[in-house]
Image: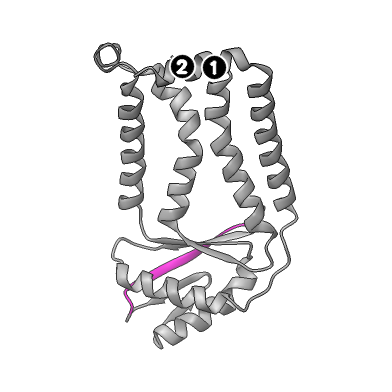
């Protein structure tokens, strides 16, 4: 069984790293484009530590633990990441643009869409590209100033989405935006969590050594 302070670090270090990366992205002067699958996978990795010391530890099967010993943690982690991979694979196509508002993204997306499909049509914040097999709508998270290009309907052409991602990424390269001031808060929280984990490890060397020995005693 994992004990403090190792459990504390395992739970919070991935979250801190995730917040730190989000802070960096939001302080850039350029929008950042990623796929919905990559975005979901990054969130899954960030939550892995919390799941590891929470649900996985609580629901760990006793019979399997007695049989496998500490190897059970590798089995449970593999199960968790397979579940994250399944969520990524079954999720509908989606693109996420960090550090951009709908007003900033709309003209860039409209230009990229017209190059890919001259028959593309807009209806408010919804876009249909019939020749590409892509139908989407824009979802804005104003507080964090990012926009999701979420698929509308189940009939989507994955190759069309890949082409749209490449074209939009190229169109966004020359775009410059103001840094999102909330990125500073994300950076500060990430650094404080990392510092807190490090301080907790340094203050409890005996407990840390015991926890490491227990984990490595396969």
Q: Is residue 138 magenta?
A: yes
Figure quadrant of the N terminus = top left
Q: Residue at x 42, y 82 (%)?
A: 120
Q: Residue at x 73, y 46 (%)?
A: 185
Find the magenta span and give its range: 132-142
Locate residue 217, reporting x and y percent: 38, 17
Q: Is residue 128 left or right of residue 200?
A: left
- Depth order, front residue of 212/33: 212
In the rendered image of this protein, does residue 202 appear above or below residue 194? above
Q: Residue at x 52, y 76 (%)?
A: 109
- Depth order, front residue of 130/9: 9
Question: To which residue does mark 2 refer?
Answer: 213
Magenta stretch: helix, strand or loop mostly: strand
Q: Residue at x 70, y 59 (%)?
A: 27
Locate residue 26, reporting x and y percent: 66, 57
Question: To which residue does mark 1 refer?
Answer: 209
The span from disc 2 to disc 1 (Cα, nearest Å) is 6 Å
Q: Which mark is residue 126?
A: none
Q: How many marks?
A: 2
Locate residue 94, reporting x and y percent: 42, 60
Q: Do callouts 2 and 1 mark residues in contact (Cβ within 8 Å)? A: yes
Q: Which secondary structure lies at badge 1? A: helix
In the rendered image of this protein, does residue 100 appear above or below residue 213? below
């Amino acid at each position: 069984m994992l004990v403090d302070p190792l459990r504390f670090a395992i739970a919070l270090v991935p979250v801190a790293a995730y917040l730190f990366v989000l802070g960096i992205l939001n302080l850039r002067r350029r929008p950042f484009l990623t796929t919905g699958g990559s975005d979901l996978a990054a969130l899954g990795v960030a939550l892995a530590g919390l799941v590891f010391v929470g649900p996985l530890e609580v629901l760990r099967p006793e019979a399997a633990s007695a049989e496998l010993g500490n190897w059970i943690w590798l089995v449970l982690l593999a199960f968790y990441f397979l579940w994250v991979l399944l969520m990524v694979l079954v999720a509908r196509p989606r693109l996420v643009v960090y550090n951009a508002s709908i007003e900033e993204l709309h003209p860039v997306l409209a230009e990229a869409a017209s190059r890919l499909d001259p028959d593309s049509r807009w209806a408010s914040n919804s876009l249909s590209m019939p020749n590409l097999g892509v139908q989407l709508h824009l979802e804005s998270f104003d507080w964090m100033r990012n926009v999701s290009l979420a698929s509308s309907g189940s009939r989507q052409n994955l190759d069309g989405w890949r082409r749209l991602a490449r074209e939009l990424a190229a169109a966004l390269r020359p775009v410059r935006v103001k840094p999102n001031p909330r990125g500073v808060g994300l950076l500060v929280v990430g650094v404080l969590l990392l510092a807190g984990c490090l301080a907790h490890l340094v203050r409890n060397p005996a407990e840390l050594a015991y926890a490491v020995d227990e984990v490595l005693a396969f």
